[in-house]
Image (cartoon, grey):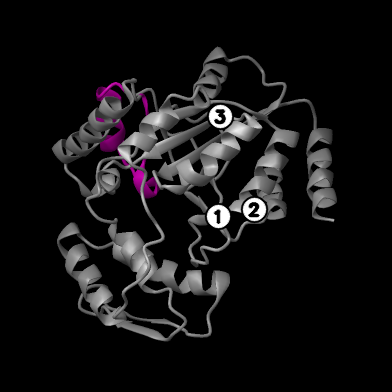
Amino acid sequence: MKDLLYKAAAGINRLKGSRGSINLLMYHEVLPAACAIEAWTVVREEEFAKQVKFLKENFTVIALDDALSLQASGNPLREDFMVVTFDDGYAGNYEVVFPIVQAYQFPVTVYVATRGCQGNGNYWFNDVIESLQAPKEYRVDLSAFTGKQYRVSRHAKGERKWDHIQGLLQDLKKLPRTDLEPAVKSLLTQADAAPERVLRHLTPAQVKEMSRSPLVTIGAHTHCHSLLPSLSRDQIGATVSQCRELLENWTSAAVEHFAFPNGDYDNEAIEVIQGLGFRSCVTTKAKPWTNEPVFEIPRTGVGRYDSVNKLANQLYSH
């Protein structure tokens, strides 16, 4: 039934006319269903496989470089093109996604934040997500930092539980850098959890192996997954340059593409990245790529609670 629904949606889209499109998708992590973490950023392996099948049947899946060439040509698009990307550099990109990429022979771009690859601990947002997974009531008082108290109900499951966690994460991301670390430390202490480490990062060896495939493009995502508008011009240059230098050392290849962490950017960030010689930047604005400049390319996010049917509806509603 689901196959019929998304094929019907595809057929309706084709009837709209011969004008083509370029869409970019943004994933983060893909893990087997046995990893029952409630996080939008973690797509189930079987759902991802269904989505890949749908994309292969209804779009021409191309590499990011090919999409840039199509846009630069100025020629009318006669097909619906799709670019598939991954943010952060999670281990499942190698362990789960890479075999599927090879089996289906479709290209992907993986934007890697390099500190995690060096084994220097998890990123704070992953610590928060993992600390709130147990089936119990969480009450967290962060009024000294965000002015709020938070509750994650023991009865909340699935997307509802993620909504609770996401609201907390969004408030933390708004904090000044000087307040973020103590706020997260306070949360982790109050959560009183010793969570299983589910959200792991690629190793340099895995990044290198993936980069050798003609199907994989490696892009930069800062060294520490920093939100660029919160940094000075020099700090932006330092974290982006450190990330690219490490990636180029690991892969022995040029790194020319960048993804803004959390989709956050401003004109200064664009200027710095342009000045460093990157060829493109991607955002998290959910729409097809039409006339946006190459340093503000939009992408549609796909997460754990997005079925193949929901993905089809998202793409065909633009």
| Secondary structure state at the residue bearing disc 2 | helix
Quarter of the image for residue 211 reads top left
- The answer to whether residue 258 is visible is no
Q: Is residue 12 above or below residue 163?
A: above
Q: Between marks 3 and 1, how big is the CA–CA gap?
A: 18 Å
Indicate yes or no whether the magenta region holds residue 111. Answer: no
Q: Between marks 1 and 2, how big is the CA–CA gap?
A: 7 Å
Q: Residues within 10 Å of mark 2 (few under 14, many from 20)?
A: many
Residue with the mark numbered 3 = 107
**At label 2, which amino acid type do we have?**
Glu
Q: Position of residue 80 (x, y in %)?
A: 69, 29
Disc number placed over residue 43 in the picture, else none: 1
**At label 3, which amino acid type do we have?**
Pro
Residue with the mark numbered 2 = 47
Which residues make up the magenta segment? 256-277
Q: Is residue 115 left or right of residue 34?
A: left
Quadrant the C terminus occupies = top right
Q: Is residue 186 left or right of residue 126?
A: left
Q: Position of residue 72 (x, y in %)?
A: 52, 16
